[in-house]
Image: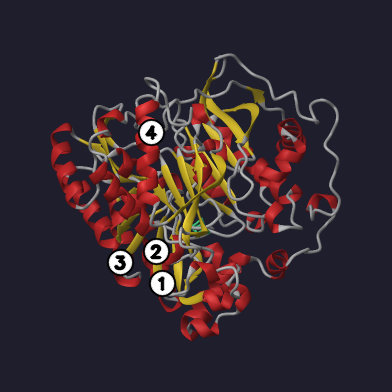
Amino acid sequence: MAPTTPPTDTPAAKGKRAPARRGEGQWALGYREPLNPNERSKKDDNPLHVRDRIENIYARGGFDSIDPGDLRGRFRWYGLYTQRKPGIDGGRTATLEPEELDDEYFMLRVRIDGGAVTTQQLAVIGEVSQTYARDTADITDRQNIQYHWIRVEDMPTIWAKLEGAGLTTMEACGDSPRVILGSPVAGIAADEVIDGTPAIDEIKRRFIGDKAFSNLPRKFKSAVSGLPDVAHEIHDVAFVGVVHPEHGPGFDVWVGGGLSTNPMIGQRLGAWVPLDEVADVYGAVISVFRDYGYRRLRHRARIKFLVKDWGAAKFREVMEEKYLGRKLVDGPAPEVPDVQRDHVGVHRQKDGKFYVGAAPIAGRVSGSTLVEVAKAAERAGSNRVRFTPLQKLVVLDVAEGEVAGLRAELTKLGLQTEPSPWRRGIMACTGIEFCKLAIVETKGRAVDLVTKLEARLTDITDGVTAPISIHINGCPNSCARIQTADIGLKGQIVTDDDGNQVEGFQVHLGGGLGLDAGFGRKLRGHKVTGDELPDYVERVVRNFVAKREPDERFAQ
Ligand code: SF4
């Protein structure tokens, strides 16, 4: 790998700085007066203060006692969103007022940095779900656990239980430094460049819950991994393991990636950062975002818009000069995998033990399942479990003689360790079951699709040498990363053959990360109804398998 320098084709690098936009609400340029209701709400009261009100006022007074500004704004800083009132169809999502969509129950997200829990923590997560969340638990593609059916009255007890186990919901959502993704096999993978766990711990210690960073222009998604296994290309900031030819193992820094309705691949800063400086650089990036991020319009507030306008060279220069007070070392790009690593199956760790990765369908599990996984892992001699950015889970540290028994137990729980390519490659967002922004059903459709593909495609399964990723979103926001899937499905209302308006999907084909990093092609008119989905996916997959060159990947 040859050392590289920062990009030279940006306006900033050419000495032609991108024209400054006026009035974007950038604090560093003096625009301190809130320019939209969200900014006003954050300025009126630091969102972290809402915890006190939840415990002392709302938990006692119930749902109707909640101030609307807290309910639809500041609650998010503690992982709480109102969930969608049951029975409202997707065609009405855009026409109703927020209060008409609000149920009196909440979704609650537990942030799990690096996706890492002990079996004791996993059992507590499961028990909280059994008692307070009607046994719901989804593994999200940000390595969090998401509950549903939470009552505000139960929040003090839920926090006491979670925090008693060393878990938190703080800044799990909101315009804040959200969960830090990490490799599910950090510290155990034989081919890992470096273990990013100490950097994740230090970032948490320094920045999470710090009021100096709790009012960002928008959400802030980050990842630190010694392997390219955390979708680093689409984060606000990501640190990916790389070996510097002179300085050894460290991290390559990416900024300005993100999906949603304006997808962008992150840009490399061309800088190499040692493990003990990752938190400093994270602090510098988040400070640039806080001070220079665009606060006028919510849909232009993610850091990617600033990075796009400035270019990587200027971004690095401002970071170094104004926040770090030193120059970063130039560094090489990380190795790029040709197939996305998903951690499913049985793999040897560098200490000779094994990790066992299992696939629920689209991350849907339950509290009871998680309690049983914790018990099964302990029976196999493990006390560590990790969630993955692909909605899977991994049991670490299993002795060779315990692997078969653990696999059998996981399989009984519906967590297959040798899943079909379809079960392995599917992800789905929350969808209309609980999400107020949703237009279509997602999780249930994922289960139906996997079941049908497994029944219909047995004749070609052996020919699918790498999982074909199928990502399903319930609306144009890309919570399930549809633009980077082989088959990406964006929920919308479509017209069926009889002229009816029904749930369906806009199809994106051929997106990917790693070697194939890029967004899927959205073909004009390429839409499919929900009912047609299994037939459609079957046709696409059969075509691909029949016509591909040897070793051709779907995204090629
Ligand atoms: Fe909700 Fe849309 Fe995100 Fe799905 S993609 S969880 S429907 S906001």
Q: Does the numbered disc 3 mark a residue whose Cβ is under 8 Å from ligand 1?
A: no
Q: Does the numbered disc 4 mark a residue whose Cβ is under 8 Å from ligand 1?
A: no
Q: Which mark is on residue 503?
A: none
Mark closest to the chain's N terminus, 4 or 1? 1
Mark closest to the chain's N terminus, 1 or 3? 3
Mark closest to the chain's N terminus, 4 or 2? 2
Amino acid type of the residue that numbered disc 4 sits on in the rendered structure: Asn
Quickly name the residue at label 1.
150
- CA gap between label 4 and label 2 equals 39 Å
Q: Is residue 282 visible?
A: yes
Quickly name the residue at label 2.
147
Amino acid type of the residue that numbered disc 1 sits on in the rendered structure: Ile
Question: In front here: 224 or 443?
Answer: 443
* Badge nearest the viewer, 4 or 3: 4
Question: In front here: 389 or 532?
Answer: 532
Query: Which residue does the image show at 32% across and 54% down from the upper left?
Result: 447
- CA gap between label 1 and label 2 equals 7 Å
Q: Are marks 1 and 2 in contact (CB under 8 Å)?
A: yes
Q: Position of residue 269 (x, y in %)?
A: 66, 30
Quickly name the residue at label 4.
543
Quadrant of the rendered image containing residue 464: top left
Q: Which mark is on residue 135?
A: 3
Q: Position of residue 510 (x, y in %)?
A: 49, 35
Query: Which residue does the image show at 44% across and 25% down from the upper left?
Result: 338
Instruction: Locate residue 299 relative to residue 549 in the image: left or right.
Output: right
